[in-house]
Image: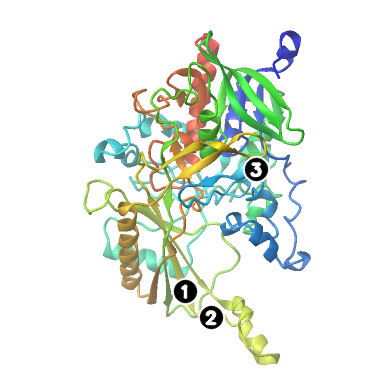
Amino acid sequence: MHVNGKAREQMSYDAIVIGSGISGGWAAKELCEKGLKTLVLERGRQVKHVTDYPMAMANPWDLPHRNRMPDAFETANPIATKCYALDEATHQYFAKDADHPYIQEKPFDWIRGYQVGGKSLIWARQTQRWSDYEFQAPARDGFAVDWPIRYKDIAPWYSHVEKFVGISGNKDGIDTLPDGEFLPPFELNCVEKHIQKAVKDHYSDRHVIIGRCAHLTKPQAVHLQQGRGQCQSRSLCYRGCPFGGYFSSNSATLPWAAKTGNLTLRPDSVVHSIIYDDKKGKATGVRVIDANTKQMTEYFAKIIFVNAAALNSNLILLNSTSSRFSNGLGNDSGLLGRYVAFHNYRGSLTASFDGYQDQYFYGRRPTTAFMPSFRNVKKQETDFQRGYMVAFSAGRAGWARGMSQEGFGADFKENLLTPGDWSVYMMMQGETVPKYENHVRLSTDQKDPYGIPQLITSIGYDENDEKVIKDFLVQGAEMLEKSGCKNIASYDDKRNPGLDIHEMGGVRMGHDPKTSLLNQWNQLHTVKNVFVTDGACMTSVGNQNPSITFMALTARATNYAASELKKGNL
């Protein structure tokens, strides 16, 4: 549908943000605060903070299947049900396989959250800054292209978002994992502290810390102004937190944007493509399909932020064709959809620990012990590129043994109340190196229910990834052994790419329009009023959890975009 005159004026805004998840929420907040009338388009349904968290306070016995999904659901959703966070209390926040088809040229488990707030309702909430060791890595090691920014460029924006989000953590003084603006940390338990000391005693380059996470351990004034409260350590986060104890778009950025009076939020709005005007030489708006009526409408704006989550942002840009851009918006280089990368989670270890039988831990903790990458950080020292973070936790089995324990009567009850032995679980979060072959593209003959070409995923592991897994399993076992652990067992679960839910790239940043899509301000080289600040923009993936970097890049880019708009440059 094309509109003109007064009708067009009613559909026009200063800015359009595509997507309401972690980065889209930040784009909305920042643009609205700067006085821009902003339209946020969300393809999924409305989810309002608190009122639309139906299972937030449910007990296991309140759920028909005691929080397990029926066989029929698992059969109908073989991809979505692989996600650790999907259960009977949370399934409403996950896109269902049949409703949103895509084509796997290589196995890829695409986990999606289509609702207001996106995956910010179901993320793992771990937040680690990048250092210059990540930003300099491609140039130093000869992969991808050089990042057009360095740590000093983004550091103030990390601080900006951390203060608003609320990040729990310690100032650990590690140059490979810069400190941030932290609230009081959660604590390691006695066995985790034992491993921390053993690692420090045996390795000079390895540091065990408590995980930095987006939880309000001690809310500050800005958090109370958001209407959020202290984290209750319920570890029921994926149901939606009625306390606002962890950060989400729904609890923080979107309400903050709404307070300005400049926000228009439109759920059930599936973005088809971005409109490019050949004569003006810039984007003028967005084509939107109503999720319920399937009717197409056009909305117009001076600047557009693409924050649909990495692969959907690639899809939208690939589908945004015109006489100027026949292969996708801004795609003169032909690299749109290329160099997609992700995090490698395949390796894990388990072990037992004798001792500390007189000690226990209480309550729930929404984070674990972490260890920043120690491989190939300051120089190349192995036969593979890059490295991995390590996460681990220790606990005692206790009452959970009752699920499989035999017996009845007084002895059975007594055994349930007796904690079991300590056990340790350790996992990797490995960096994958972006490759041209790892890509997404549009199908030429298969459409989704909205008439949009389906996305084809062609993303896989390589020999480098296999070497990283083997190194982690060897080094992890060695660290556990030196810490006094026993019965150490290693696993490679062979999971498909995608299940990490950290897919990045395809619309990468860089210096040169011939080898990248975005400049140092997350701005399309050839379409200056379109910005991409979600995972799609990432030139490489580092080994840290990525969300805090998406947020910081978004805040930085919105500040630049608003300034350029005011100057008349956009």
Question: Where 298 falls versus 141 (above or below)?
Answer: above
Check disc 1 and report its element: helix, strand or loop. strand
**Do labels 2 and 1 touch, CB within 8 Å?**
yes
Q: Depth check: give the residue in front, 97 or 378.
A: 97
**Residue 500 drawn at (x, y percent):** 49, 52
Residue on which the image places disc 1: 423
Identify the residue shown where x is 30% and y is 61%: 471
**Residue 358 drawn at (x, y percent):** 50, 80
Quadrant of the image occupied by residue 83: bottom right
Q: Comparing marks 3 and 2, which lies closer to the viewer?
A: 3
Check disc 3 and report its element: helix, strand or loop. loop
Identify the residue shown where x is 32% and y is 33%: 145
Question: What is the crowding at mark 2: few (fewer than 14 residues within 10 Å), some, or many (at least 20)?
Answer: some
Question: What is the crowding at mark 3: few (fewer than 14 residues within 10 Å), some, or many (at least 20)?
Answer: many
Amino acid on which disc 3 is placed:
Tyr
Q: How many marks?
A: 3
Question: Where 94 falls versus 426 (above or below)?
Answer: above
Amino acid on which disc 1 is placed:
Ser
Quadrant of the image occupied by residue 270: top right
Check disc 2 and report its element: helix, strand or loop. loop
**Do labels 3 and 2 touch, CB within 8 Å?**
no
Q: Depth check: give the residue in front, 174 or 528.
A: 528
Q: Which mark is residue 420?
A: 2
Residue on which the image places disc 3: 114
Amino acid on which disc 2 is placed:
Gly
